[in-house]
Image: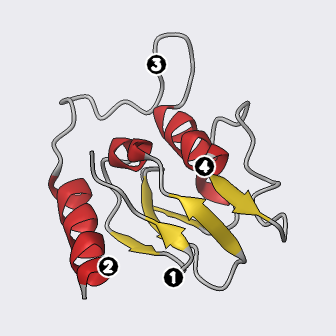
Amino acid sequence: MELAFLLLFIVFFCGHAKVSASDNLLSPKGVNYEVTALMAVKTKMRDELHVMDGWDINSVDPCTWNMVGCSAEGFVTSLEMTNMGLSGTLSPSIGNLTHLRTMSVPHSLHLYLA
């Protein structure tokens, strides 16, 4: 029950976060903010099946990555991480995915709110 509440809180918070009027995906230096957030998520995971091997910090578009769903505008809207053999801790950087609407995580993932 507590895990379900926590997941709902995260999805609600991320789904209602406001972003700048420009909704710009890239920083002035050409870094995709969502790629940066997802890479922070990756660093906290144990990925024994290597399902995150295609996640690349040098990528401009995470929409082609395994487990990542995006809107037509190119924003990350879903993460489907169940049944992928992942474990670890969910990075607080998940909150930087401002258009995230749905997320499924394995029971072996630890969720912490700071």
Work out whether residue 93 or residue 77 is closer to the camera in this orientation and state it: 93
Decide which of tag 1 and tag 2 comes sooner along the chain.
2
Work out whether residue 25 or residue 14 is closer to the camera in this orientation and state it: 14
> According to the image, label 3 marks what residue?
27
Q: As drawn, is 52 to the left or to the right of 61? A: right
Which type of secondary structure does the marked residue at label 1 adopt?
A: loop
Which type of secondary structure does the marked residue at label 2 adopt?
A: helix
> According to the image, label 1 marks what residue?
107
Q: Label 1: few (<14), some or many (≥20) within 10 Å?
A: few
CA gap between label 1 and label 3 equals 34 Å
User: Residue 77 location, x and y as percent?
Assistant: 40, 62
Which quadrant would residue 71 be assigned to in this image? bottom left
Decide which of tag 1 and tag 4 comes sooner along the chain.
4
Decide which of tag 4 and tag 2 comes sooner along the chain.
2
Work out whether residue 103 or residue 70 is closer to the camera in this orientation and state it: 103
Which type of secondary structure does the marked residue at label 4 adopt?
A: loop
Q: Quadrant of the N terminus?
A: bottom left
> According to the image, label 4 marks what residue?
44
- Three-letter residue code for mark 4: Lys
- Mark 1 vs 2: CB contact within 8 A: yes
Which quadrant would residue 5 be assigned to in this image? bottom left
CA gap between label 1 and label 2 equals 9 Å
Say whether residue 71 is visible. no
CA gap between label 4 and label 2 equals 18 Å
Q: Label 2: few (<14), some or many (≥20) within 10 Å?
A: few
Q: Nearer the viewer, mark 3 or mark 4?
A: 4
Decide which of tag 1 and tag 3 comes sooner along the chain.
3
